[in-house]
Image (spheres, helix red, strand yellow):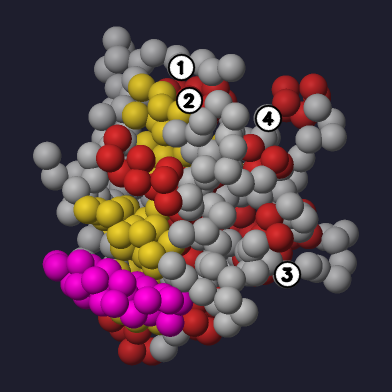
């Protein structure tokens, strides 16, 4: 069965705890410590609200996961500064699956509000019939941070991953085999200091008929040649420079299909400005470009527009379909 590459329904999480995350800054070179923390959360909340409004105006069905008040009352000292990036802890499938992933840092593990998320999805009329914990019970060091660590070609059933602390090779291979992906591409990346790129989705994005990728990140050029050849099968490949990736988040974009069936490509305003005019024209052939001003979230959080979006591929539910899945 051919699976859709795109969806018109997404989940976003309101960033009520947003601030500079000391734990993730250990390996996320895209984070920048702010000089003044006083207005960071409020600025992020405003950027988030504006982005939700803009996407809804473009015909995207945005489900917002609001603050978990019960968790906050029980654990006043537990905060989730990166909760605005939900694509790292869960993904969904066309047959009703909800997959929950292992997370690298302790404070990001607290983001996994499975019961709250399931209720949100069911209340929206979607079927959630199977819960799969990709994470091992002890979490350990075999981390695979969702669609941050893996970039999926749903049409060709291919999986791409840049090996890092957030993308363990054994967990990557295990995930691919258990979920029936026909081809796997795991590769080594490096920034100018020799450190691995922390998430695959900051360096590449796959749409229906295009792909954006940063070739300069690859350690082994033969591996890049293999990846590029696989992407060229049915897609226009748009190569971006390391500067476009690291300073503008041009790789962290996402193609969606709105409620009218029209194609749109979501990105930050920074990414829009980072693309050359020729590249913007290339992308515009694949959908309306929707740039969002998320400078605070992007600069301090070290993630961009794609990271803020969790795609929902779940089927519509009938009255007897849904089972509320609870988890310990």
Q: Secondary structure at mark 3?
A: loop
Relative side of 131 to 21, left or right: left
Look at mark 1 in the image and give the residue it sits on.
325
Please report the residue visible at 24 percent of the width from the left and 71 percent of the height from the top: 226
Question: Given this view, does label 1 or label 4 mark the residue nearer the observer?
Answer: 1
Q: Badges 1 and 3: C-beta atoms under 8 Å apart?
A: no
**Badge number at residue 32:** 3
Q: Is residue 123 in the magenta section?
A: no
Whichever of callouts 1 and 4 sits on the residue coming sooner in the sequence is: 4
Question: Given this view, does label 2 or label 3 mark the residue nearer the observer?
Answer: 3
Tell me the CA gap for discs 1 and 4.
17 Å
**Badge number at residue 68:** 4
Q: Residues within 10 Å of mark 1 (few under 14, many from 20)?
A: some
Whichever of callouts 1 and 2 sits on the residue coming sooner in the sequence is: 2
Residue 214 shows in the view: no
Q: Position of residue 153 (x, y in %)?
A: 26, 55
- Residue lying at the far left in this picture: please name it: 1
The correct choice, above or below, for 51 with respect to 29 in the image is above
Q: Residues within 10 Å of mark 3 (few under 14, many from 20)?
A: some
Name the residue nearer the viewer: 195 or 22.
195
């Amino acid at each position: 069965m051919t699976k859709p590459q795109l969806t018109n329904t997404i989940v976003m999480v309101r960033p009520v705890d947003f601030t500079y995350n000391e734990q993730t800054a250990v390996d996320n070179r895209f984070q920048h410590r702010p000089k003044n923390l006083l207005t960071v959360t409020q600025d992020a909340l405003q950027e988030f609200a504006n982005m939700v409004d803009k996407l809804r105006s473009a015909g995207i069905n945005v489900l917002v996961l609001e603050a978990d008040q019960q968790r906050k009352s029980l654990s006043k000292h537990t905060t989730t500064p990166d909760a605005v990036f939900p694509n790292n802890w869960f993904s969904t499938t066309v047959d009703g699956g909800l997959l929950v992933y292992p997370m690298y840092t302790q404070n990001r593990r607290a983001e996994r509000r499975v019961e709250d998320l399931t209720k949100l999805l069911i209340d929206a009329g979607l079927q959630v019939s199977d819960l799969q914990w990709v994470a091992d019970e002890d979490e350990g060091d075999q981390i695979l941070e969702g669609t941050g660590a893996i970039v999926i070609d749903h049409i060709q059933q291919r999986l791409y991953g840049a090996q890092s602390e957030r993308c363990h090779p054994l967990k990557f291979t295990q995930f691919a085999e258990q979920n029936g992906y026909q081809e796997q591409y795991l590769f080594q990346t490096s920034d100018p200091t020799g450190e691995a790129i922390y998430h695959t989705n900051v360096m590449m994005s796959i749409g229906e008929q295009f792909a954006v990728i940063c070739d300069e990140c690859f350690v082994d050029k033969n591996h890049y040649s293999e990846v590029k050849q696989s992407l060229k099968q049915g897609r226009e490949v748009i190569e971006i420079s390391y500067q476009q990736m690291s300073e503008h988040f041009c790789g962290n974009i996402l193609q969606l299909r709105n409620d009218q069936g029209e194609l749109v490509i979501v990105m930050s305003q920074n990414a829009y400005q980072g693309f050359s005019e020729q590249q913007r024209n290339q992308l515009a052939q694949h959908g309306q470009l929707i740039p969002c001003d998320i400078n605070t979230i992007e600069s301090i959080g070290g993630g961009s527009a794609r990271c803020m979006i969790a795609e929902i591929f779940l089927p519509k539910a009938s009255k007897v379909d849904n089972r509320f899945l609870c988890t310990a």
